[in-house]
Image (cartoon, grey):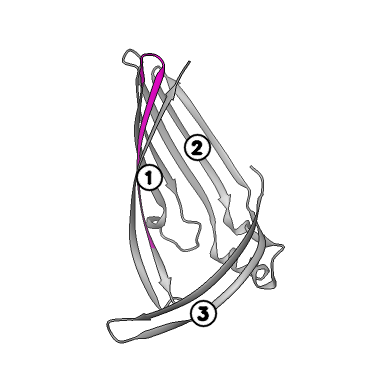
């Protein structure tokens, strides 16, 4: 796919204050502002394929994005000046997705499973910061006309947040659980 441009408008206000157990106190100077700008997302190159072996379908794809090519346009001087920082902060990534589906034709049942690996686009982030997802699902047909599909996705990764421009760092272990369902009528 090609370069994507997103036109954005943001209005923001920031004010924060914290007092810690050791008595340290921080105030963040309030900031208000408004911006209008375009973001040019980089090219995304994808390659994928699937293979059908009897009742088993195996598929996968890899997606390459060079996040250092992201840039602001039609923006104020402060945002335009971030071009150099973007090149130092971001890196290229390769997302990987794998999946399989096995069809029990006599029973009208399909079992599915998959894995996704989505690396962090930030320079220096360890592999533990990559978003990883394990997925499972099943689909079946009722009376040759109603299709029911159910899915589950478990995600896990680490991250951190810096508060007050790096004074305090909070590490997090993130896990997500998503259930999906769909019913469709075939005629």
Q: Is residue 126 left or right of residue 87?
A: left
Residue hosting label 3: 30
Spatial separation of the CA atoms under disc 2 and disc 3: 45 Å
Residue drawn at (34%, 86%), measured in percent from left and top? Answer: 24
Q: Main secondary structure of the magenta part?
A: strand
Q: Which mark, residue 133?
A: 1
Q: Quadrant of residue 88?
A: bottom right
The residue mark sitting in front, 2 or 3, is 3
Name the quarter where the N terminus is drawn: top right
- Above or below, comparing residue 27 to residue 43 in the picture: below
The residue mark sitting in front, 2 or 1, is 1
The disc, 1 or 3, on the residue closer to the chain's N-terminal end is 3
- Above or below, comparing residue 157 to residue 171 in the picture: above
What SS does tag 3 mark? strand
Q: Is residue 157 left or right of residue 81?
A: left
Residue 101: percent from left, percent from top:
39, 27
The reply to whether the C-beta atoms of the residues labelled 2 and 3 are less than 8 Å apart is: no
Q: Which residues are magenta?
A: 141-159
The disc, 2 or 3, on the residue closer to the chain's N-terminal end is 3
- Above or below, comparing residue 78 to residue 72 in the picture: below
């Amino acid at each position: 796919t090609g370069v994507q441009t997103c036109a954005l408008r943001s209005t923001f206000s920031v004010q924060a204050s914290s007092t810690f157990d050791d008595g340290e106190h921080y105030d963040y100077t309030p900031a208000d502002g408004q911006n209008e700008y375009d973001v040019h997302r980089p090219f995304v190159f994808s390659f994928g394929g699937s293979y059908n072996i009897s009742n088993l379908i195996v598929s996968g794809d890899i997606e390459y994005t060079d996040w250092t090519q992201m840039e602001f346009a039609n923006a104020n001087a402060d945002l335009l000046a971030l071009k150099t920082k973007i090149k130092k902060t971001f890196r290229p990534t390769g997302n990987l997705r794998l999946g399989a589906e096995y069809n029990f034709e006599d029973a009208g049942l399909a079992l599915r499973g998959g894995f996704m690996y989505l690396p962090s686009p930030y320079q220096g982030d360890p592999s533990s910061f990559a978003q990883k997802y394990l997925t499972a699902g099943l689909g079946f047909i009722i009376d040759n006309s109603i299709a029911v599909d159910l899915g589950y996705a478990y995600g896990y990764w680490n991250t951190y947040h810096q508060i007050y421009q790096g004074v305090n760092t909070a590490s997090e272990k993130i896990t997500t659980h998503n259930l999906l369902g769909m019913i469709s009528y075939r005629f």
